[in-house]
Image (spheres, grey):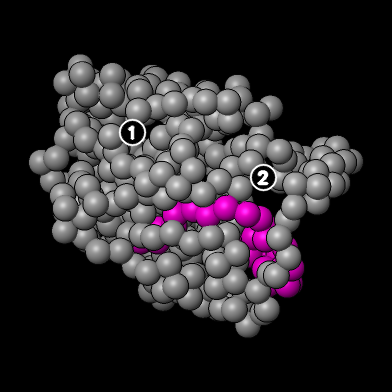
C-alpha cells in the first residue's frame, strides 16, 4: 500500500493519478470534501472514465500533525509521497507555515521511521536559500538564509532538515526541489489569479526570471525515485528557464492575447503593493502581492537538473508544451 499526503493538491493529485493508473493500491490523505472533488477533476483531465481508477482509492480524512491518526494510517504502507505543504509568501502566516511544513513533515518522517516505509518528500527551490545573481544552482549549494529569506523558504528548509534528520536515523528517503510548477489544475490554487489576469489581458511584467517544470514530470520523477534504490539524496527538478516577461508572453499568446510590454518599476510596485494591501484590509483576506513577492519575482534564478537527468535518464517536457497543454485543458474546463 502507498500513502500520498496532500493528495488533493496539484502535485499530489498527479502522483495519485499516475499510481492509480498503474493499478497500485493507494491511500490518500485529505482535509476537505471539496479537495476530493478537485482531485477527481484532475483525473478527468486525462481520461473521460477517470472514475474507474479514482474510485478504488482509499481516502482518509486526517491532519498530518495528528500522530495517533498517522500511526493507524501508516499500517501496511511501504511508500510515502509527502506532497502536503503550505505555500504563502505572507510572513504573517509564519505560524501556520511552520506547523504544516516543519512540524507536519517531522511527523511524517517519524511515522516512516516507525513503519519502515520509504519517503519521497517534496521540498522547493525556495529551500535552497539566498542565491547570487546569475548563479546556476545545483544540489551542492549550502543554505544561506541571507536577508531576503521568506517565512515560506525558511519553513521549507527546516522541513527538509527533518527529512535529513530521519535519513541519519536510518530512514530511506529522497527529496525533490521543484522549480515553478506548470500543469493542468494549477488554476485551482494560487495560479488562478495569474490565469485570470493573463486571459483578461496583462500589460505589466516584473523583472527577473525563474525555472519552470511540468507537474506531470514532477509526479513521474517522484515515482521513479521512490521505486528506485536511490536514497539519502535530493534532486533539483527543473525543465528550463525563462524571464517573467517571456513566460507571461508565452501564456498570453497561448490564450490568443497580446503579451505584456510594460516593466513594473520599483515605484510602480510600491503603488501596487499599497493598493493590494488596502484591498486585502477591506476584504479581510491576505494580500496577493507584497514586498516579499516582488523581491522574489525580481531575482534572476538559474537551476541545474543535471543530477536528476543523470540519475534517472529522464527528459523534461518543454515549457512551451507545458503551457500549451495547461491552457488547452483550462479552455476545455471553462466550456463544461
Q: Nearer the viewer, residue 266 or 10?
A: 266
Residue drawn at the location 52% of the way across and 26% of the way down = 146
Left or right: 282 in relation to 269: right
The residue indicated by pointer 1 is: 141
Relative to 127, say whether 217 is above or below: below
| Residue 294 - label | 2
How dense is the environment of label 2, judged by Cα within 10 Å: few (below 14), some, or many (20 and up)?
Answer: some
Is residue 4 among what the camera can see? Answer: no
Q: Is residue 215 magenta?
A: yes
Based on the displayed image, in which of its 4 quarters is residue 316 positioned? Answer: bottom left
**Residue 124 at what x, y percent from top left?**
42, 40
Mark 2 and mark 1 residues within 8 Å of each other at the beta carbon = no
How dense is the environment of label 1, judged by Cα within 10 Å: few (below 14), some, or many (20 and up)?
Answer: few
Residue drawn at the location 64% of the way across and 41% of the way down = 295
Q: CA distance from mark 2 to mark 1?
A: 24 Å
The mark that comes first in sequence, 2 or 1, is: 1
Region rendered in magenta: 192-216
Amino acid at each position: 500500500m502507498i500513502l500520498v499526503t496532500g493528495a488533493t493538491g496539484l502535485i499530489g493529485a498527479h502522483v495519485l493519478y499516475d499510481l492509480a493508473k498503474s493499478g497500485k493500491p493507494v491511500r490518500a490523505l485529505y482535509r476537505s470534501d471539496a479537495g476530493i472533488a478537485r482531485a477527481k477533476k484532475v483525473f478527468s483531465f486525462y481520461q473521460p472514465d477517470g472514475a474507474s481508477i479514482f474510485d478504488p482509492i482509499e481516502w482518509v480524512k486526517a491532519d498530518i500533525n495528528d500522530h495517533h491518526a498517522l500511526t493507524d494510517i501508516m499500517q501496511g504502507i511501504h511508500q510515502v509521497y509527502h506532497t502536503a505543504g503550505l505555500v504563502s509568501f505572507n510572513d504573517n502566516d509564519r505560524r501556520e507555515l511552520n506547523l504544516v511544513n516543519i512540524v507536519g513533515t517531522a511527523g511524517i518522517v517519524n511515522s516512516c521511521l516507525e513503519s519502515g516505509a520509504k519517503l519521497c518528500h517534496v521540498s522547493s527551490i525556495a529551500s535552497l536559500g539566498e542565491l547570487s545573481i546569475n548563479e546556476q544552482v545545483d544540489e551542492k549549494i549550502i543554505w544561506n538564509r541571507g536577508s531576503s529569506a521568506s517565512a515560506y523558504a525558511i519553513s521549507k528548509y527546516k522541513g527538509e532538515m527533518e527529512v535529513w534528520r530521519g535519513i541519519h536515523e536510518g530512514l530511506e528517503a529522497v527529496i525533490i526541489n521543484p522549480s515553478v510548477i506548470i500543469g493542468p489544475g494549477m488554476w485551482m490554487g494560487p495560479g488562478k489569479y495569474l490565469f485570470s489576469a493573463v486571459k483578461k489581458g496583462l500589460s505589466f511584467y516584473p523583472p527577473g526570471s525563474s525555472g519552470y517544470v511540468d507537474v506531470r514530470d514532477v509526479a513521474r520523477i517522484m515515482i521513479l525515485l521512490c521505486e528506485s534504490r536511490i536514497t539519502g539524496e535530493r534532486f533539483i527538478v527543473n525543465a528550463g528557464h525563462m524571464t517573467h516577461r517571456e513566460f507571461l508572453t508565452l501564456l498570453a499568446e497561448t490564450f490568443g492575447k497580446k503579451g505584456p510590454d510594460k516593466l513594473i518599476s520599483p515605484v510602480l510596485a510600491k503603488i501596487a503593493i499599497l493598493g493590494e494591501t488596502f484591498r486585502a484590509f477591506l476584504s479581510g483576506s491576505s494580500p496577493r502581492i507584497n514586498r516579499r513577492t516582488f523581491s522574489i519575482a525580481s531575482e534572476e534564478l538559474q537551476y541545474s537538473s543535471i543530477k536528476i537527468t543523470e540519475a534517472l535518464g529522464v527528459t523534461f517536457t518543454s515549457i512551451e508544451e507545458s503551457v500549451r497543454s495547461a491552457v488547452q485543458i483550462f479552455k476545455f474546463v471553462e466550456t463544461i
